[in-house]
């Protein structure tokens, strides 16, 4: 019906509908516009800012700790690799 709405005479369609079905005996329903704020729970901007800031801080600390751990592990691996027994002998000669 949406695509055909320019071609339909609404008054004629209503007249035909009422002729086939008869008059509506029920009470007239009143349509009210729904309040857009009804049923919505609003989240404050301060809460969103606080949660995102805390998340960024915790994530940053986690990445920093992981980076430092990997760096120290790499440094330990390099120091033990160059100071192993077989390499000590080859370096002294």
Image (cartoon, rainbow, N blue to C red):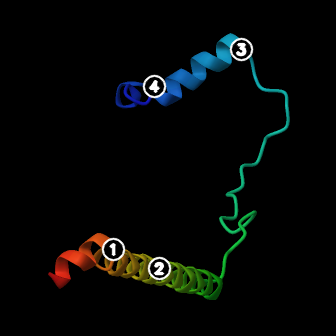
Q: What residue did someone put label 4 on?
A: 1
Going from the N terminus, do you reach mark 2 or mark 3 first? 3
Q: Is residue 21 left or right of residue 84?
A: right
Question: From the viewer's perspective, is residue 67 above or below residue 6?
Answer: below
Tell me the mark number nearer the camera, choosing from 1 and 2: 1
Q: Are marks 3 and 1 in contact (CB under 8 Å)?
A: no
* Horizontal side, residue 20 vs residue 62: left or right: right
**Distance between the alpha carbons at the discs numbered 2 and 3:** 80 Å
From the viewer's side, name the closer residue of 17 and 85: 85
Residue 21: image tag: 3
Of pointers 2 and 4, the one earlier in the residue sequence: 4
Q: Identify the mark nearer the N-term, 1 or 2.
A: 2
Q: Residue at x 58, y 25 (%)?
A: 14
Q: Secondary structure at mark 3?
A: helix
Q: CA distance from mark 3 to mark 1?
A: 102 Å
In the image, 64 versus 91, the foreground residue is 91
Give the residue at mark 1: 85
């Amino acid at each position: 019906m949406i695509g055909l709405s320019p071609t339909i005479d609404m008054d004629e369609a209503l007249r035909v509908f009422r002729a086939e079905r008869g008059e509506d005996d029920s009470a007239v329903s009143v349509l009210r516009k729904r309040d857009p704020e009804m049923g919505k729970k609003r989240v404050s901007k301060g809460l969103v800012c606080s949660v995102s800031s805390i998340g960024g801080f915790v994530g940053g600390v986690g990445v920093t700790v992981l980076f430092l751990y990997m760096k120290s592990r790499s440094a330990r691996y390099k120091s033990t690799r160059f100071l192993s027994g077989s390499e000590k002998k080859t370096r002294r000669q």
